[in-house]
Amino acid sequence: MAEPPAHNRIVVGSTPTGPTKFGVRQILRRTRTNNDFINQQIIVFRKEIMMEIKAQAQLLMNLNEVDLKIDHLQKELQQIPIREREEELDVLSKKSKVDRAIAEIADLEHKKRILEKEVAETTDRMAEFQKKLPMIKTNKEYQLALKEIDENKKFNKQRDDQTLEIIGQLETLAVTKKEDEEYLHGSTVAFEARKKELESERLKLTDALGELVQIKEGISPKIEARFLAAYQRIRKQKSDAVVTIFGGICQGCHMKISPQMRLDMQKTTTATSLFTCPTCHRILCLPDWTGLTDTNAIMTKVL
């Protein structure tokens, strides 16, 4: 069968009765329509990209918020044994003071017993000399015996004075020891109560930390690998890896962000990657790019 003429084909610009008068216009109109459709699709695609970038930034902001709170809780947990040790050292210091007082009292008591023994021995010697006095026949021996008795009396007087001084010290130490023992008892009771409080605080912090870790594990898989890697790289240097722009200022380094960058962030037809601060290289978000998960309720439990 012979091929029908062009105007009989079902093509743009022809009809079964022959070529149409406005074929070229129709072609141009349809071309413009196709171009408009393609442009609209490009705009929609760019909007979708920007929405995805914004969503990723929101997730990163939220992840950073969770990480910062995890850091805070971990520091608080690390401080608990330190605080407990400080209070325990205070109790031990008071106990050491009591122990020193007890040791000093024991030492003074020992010295007092030695002095009393020496006085007793000297008194016995003087009694012996007193008994021998009537039996002494020469004046010289008698004077020597009297001198010996006098020296023993002086010796005893010195030992008695030392004994009285020690007794005074013992009385002072006894009062001080009693006060220190009362302080020690109060501190020990308070420390035991404080230990229970710190243990309760540790359990609360541990529970809150576990909840935050679960939230983090729920957020991380939603973030693209390249963005998550960038975030983790920045966070090794700066704990607040994601910050907002307020008043045209980066809230991380407080340096000004160029108007063009702020405009690009506000447009919905641009951007294919995250925005970072040119100065501190933190990931930037606009104020209305809020996080998606509220962790304040968890932190309220332990604050």
Image (tube, rainbow, N blue to C red):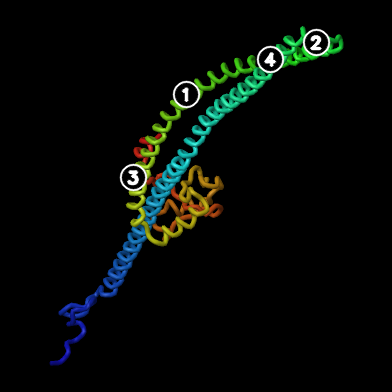
Bin the neighbour count of mark 2 within 10 Å (Cα to Cα): few under 14, some 14-19, many 20 and up: few
Residue shown at the point (28%, 73%) measured from the top left: 27
75 vs 148, nearest the viewer: 148
CA gap between label 3 and label 4 equals: 84 Å
CA gap between label 2 and label 1 equals: 65 Å
Q: Circle 4 is placed at which residue position?
A: 124
Q: Quadrant of the C terminus?
A: top left
Report the residue that reaches farthest toward the bottom. Answer: 1
Task: Locate residue 120, reporting x and y percent.
Answer: 66, 16
Name above or below for residue 42 compared with residue 278.
below
CA gap between label 4 and label 2 equals: 19 Å
Labels 3 and 1: the sequence-earlier one: 1
Q: Are marks 2 and 1 in contact (CB under 8 Å)?
A: no
Q: Circle 3 is placed at which residue position?
A: 211
Q: Are marks 3 and 1 in contact (CB under 8 Å)?
A: no
* Residue 229 image-quadrant placement: bottom left
Name above or below for residue 299 compared with residue 228.
above
Task: Locate residue 260, reporting x and y percent.
Answer: 50, 53
Q: Nearer the viewer, mark 3 or mark 4?
A: 4
Q: Are marks 4 and 2 in contact (CB under 8 Å)?
A: no
Amino acid tagged 1: His
Amino acid tagged 3: Glu
Amino acid tagged 4: Asp
Labels 3 and 2: the sequence-earlier one: 2
Residue 185 circle label: 1
Q: Quadrant of the N terminus?
A: bottom left
Report the residue that reaches farthest toward the right. Answer: 140
Q: Nearer the viewer, mark 4 or mark 2?
A: 2
Labels 3 and 4: the sequence-earlier one: 4
Q: Circle 2 is placed at which residue position?
A: 136
